[in-house]
Amino acid sequence: MTARTSRGRRPGAPDTRAEVLAAARASFAEKGFRGTTIRAVAAAAGVDPALVHHYFGSKDDLFVAALEIPVDPRAVLAPVVAAGPDGAGERLLRAFLGVWDDPAVQPGLLAMVRSLLVDDAGGRLREAFVPVVVGPVLAGLVADRADVRIPLVASQVLGLIVARYVVALPPMAQMPADDVVARIGPVLQHYLTGDLA
Amino acid sequence: MTARTSRGRRPGAPDTRAEVLAAARASFAEKGFRGTTIRAVAAAAGVDPALVHHYFGSKDDLFVAALEIPVDPRAVLAPVVAAGPDGAGERLLRAFLGVWDDPAVQPGLLAMVRSLLVDDAGGRLREAFVPVVVGPVLAGLVADRADVRIPLVASQVLGLIVARYVVALPPMAQMPADDVVARIGPVLQHYLTGDLA
DNA sequence: CGCACAATTCAACACATGATGAAAAACGTC
DNA sequence: GACGTTTTTCATCATGTGTTGAATTGTGCG
């Protein structure tokens, strides 16, 4: 936590690089891109700011390093789609929760969403994420009128993410995953295959 | 748009103060609190940065001035609740859309949400907004288990706000209000009074 | 041991930002 | 028309930030 006083290489073999990356992830996840300062990240890792640059280069490079998450969205969604439309709402939700509730993945995703929500004013989310990544995959699940159904699914899933992770609204953040699936799953199913007004 | 060159008061009677406030609202709404600089606001209003301080004081003061919205949430929600639980989902949604789709109100609300989502890391939204403002009002609508139903409603409404206004997801942002009500209203109704798993 | 290399800090720069106080120009009033 | 007031800009400061290059200390290899 506190900065070191002596100069030069430290004894032992501490993986300082990993600690810096973890501190960066945490800060980006909590305060977004602009709210994160390299000095703060360095202080949280007990390290000089120059070391951050030594390892990761610019602040932008550090950010993309923090975004690196050990998850392939297509691999996660493929089995959901493969099993067909029956019960797809519940399966889809369970897959999402499985990823977001994983502590190894969550900070990277949170950093991503926070920055997309504000620093980018939604640009990438609007132009690439839903239309290119999520949309085509879900297209295999919806009965018809994909152009209406997919945004509806996206709106409920986005709301869940924001309520449960971004602002951590008390009852939503602590609700067991099974309860979330049981309560919101049917709604997703309705958006995917139900009767549209 | 461009800055003035000559000094002193301008001829005519332009309401410069209002222009500065409008520029500030727009910037806060689009880029959030941290992303907004007083210099940029001044430039957008065609004015010297010092004038912004002259009229509004600090950046924080300017921000709260930009948040001032001509809407009393209780007055909007009261009739929704007064009419009872039947069709409350649709009425609730229509009331929300009426406020958010109003161009005079939207920038202030957007600025609010963007800053709450990131600059405050959700603090106020979590501790005051939903529990204190929205929660008690909606409590008059839910059948039972308000502690579960209200967060569910909040998650869907939040998702709608994020999809339609914050990131402006294409099909959701252009969808006519009536269609939104017709498609998401029943879901809200279900969250309010339906069968919970 | 000696030496290349990696890890780490120090000191400093350039720049953007929020803020301040004084000066200039137009207005309103007597 | 003189004068106080309001509106507006200019010049400037202090601070925080990303970034850089040199200096220092430990590690590993021959």
Image: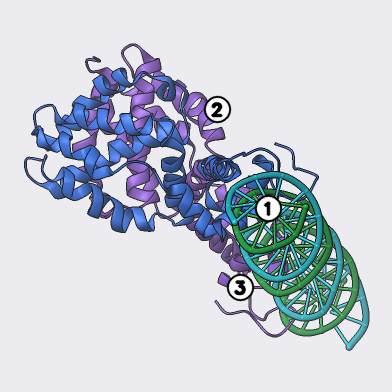
Chain colours: A purple, B blue, C cyan, D green
Residue B53 position within the rendered picture, expressed as x and y whole percent measured from the top left: 61, 57
Question: How far apart in space, not on screen, are marks 3 and 2 (Cα)?
Answer: 41 Å
Question: Which residue occupies the foreground of this view, B46 or A111?
Answer: B46
**Secondary structure category for the residue under label 1:** helix
* Helix, strand or loop at mark 3: loop
Residue B140, position in %: x, y?
10, 43
Percent across and percent down for residue A10 are 68, 79
Q: Residue at x 34, y 28 (%)?
A: A153
Q: Is residue A5 left or right of residue B135?
A: right
Q: Chain of mark 2?
A: A
Q: Which residue is mark 3?
A: A14
Q: What subunit carries mark 1? A: B
Q: Residue at x 36, y 41 (%)?
A: B70
Residue pointed to by mark 1: B49
Q: Residue furthest top?
A: A144
Question: Could you tell me how far apart the alpha carbons at marks 3 and 1 are, in whole angstroms?
Answer: 48 Å
**Looking at the image, is mark 3 or mark 2 nearer the viewer?**
2
Circle 3 Cα neighbour tier, 10 Å, few/some/many (<14 / 14–19 / ≥20): few
What residue does disc 2 label? Answer: A127
- Numbered disc 2: secondary structure: helix
* Contact check, label 1 and label 2, Cβ < 8 Å: no
